[in-house]
Amino acid sequence: MPTKRPRSTIIAADRAVIVALQDVSNYAPTNPAYSLTALRDLLEALTQAQETELRAKRAYEVAREQADEIARRLHRTVLEVKIQVMAQYGSDSPVVHAVGRKQRSERKRPVRRAPLQT
């Protein structure tokens, strides 16, 4: 049995078959699982499952947006903390290195280039 979900076009065709069967007055299957009542129950269960799935997707999107916003706020705060550490301890303090910044003494000094000879 296939494990993939049928495409929406196939489901729409299945719904059309159910509607068409409702117009057939003498449809009486020998297996009760194929009756119109069973088909309508399955269709209703599918509709409810799709609504539940949609609600879960919306809840996931809201939770993801909240997590993204909190992550951005955390990152901005950490950047501001690094600036605060530099202001409090100075730009050449070992604490500056501990928070992930380069100390002033670790920076490469600019080197003057010799003029080009033509």
Image (cartoon, rainbow, N blue to C red):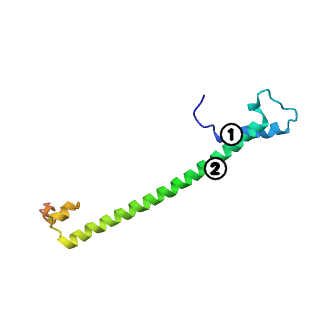
Quadrant of the drawing holding the C terminus = bottom left
Question: Along the line of sight, which residue is nearer the eye, 38 or 60?
Answer: 38
User: What is the quadrant of residue 29 in the picture?
Assistant: top right
Q: Amino acid at mark 2?
A: Glu
Q: Is residue 80 left or right of residue 16?
A: left
- Residue drawn where x is 41% and y is 62% of the image: 70
Please state the horizontal and vertical placement of residue 75, each as a whole percent of the image.
34, 62
- Report the residue marked by disc 2: 51
Question: Along the line of sight, which residue is nearer the eye, 45 or 10?
Answer: 45
User: What is the quadrant of residue 80 in the picture?
Assistant: bottom left
- Report the residue marked by disc 1: 11
Please state the horizontal and vertical placement of residue 35, each as a whole percent of the image.
78, 34
Helix, strand or loop at mark 1: helix
Q: In the rendered view, would you say 51 is above or below 112?
A: above
Question: Along the line of sight, which residue is nearer the eye, 104 or 69?
Answer: 69
Q: In the rendered view, would you say 18 is above or below 58?
A: above
Labelled pair 1, 2 in contact (Cβ < 8 Å): no
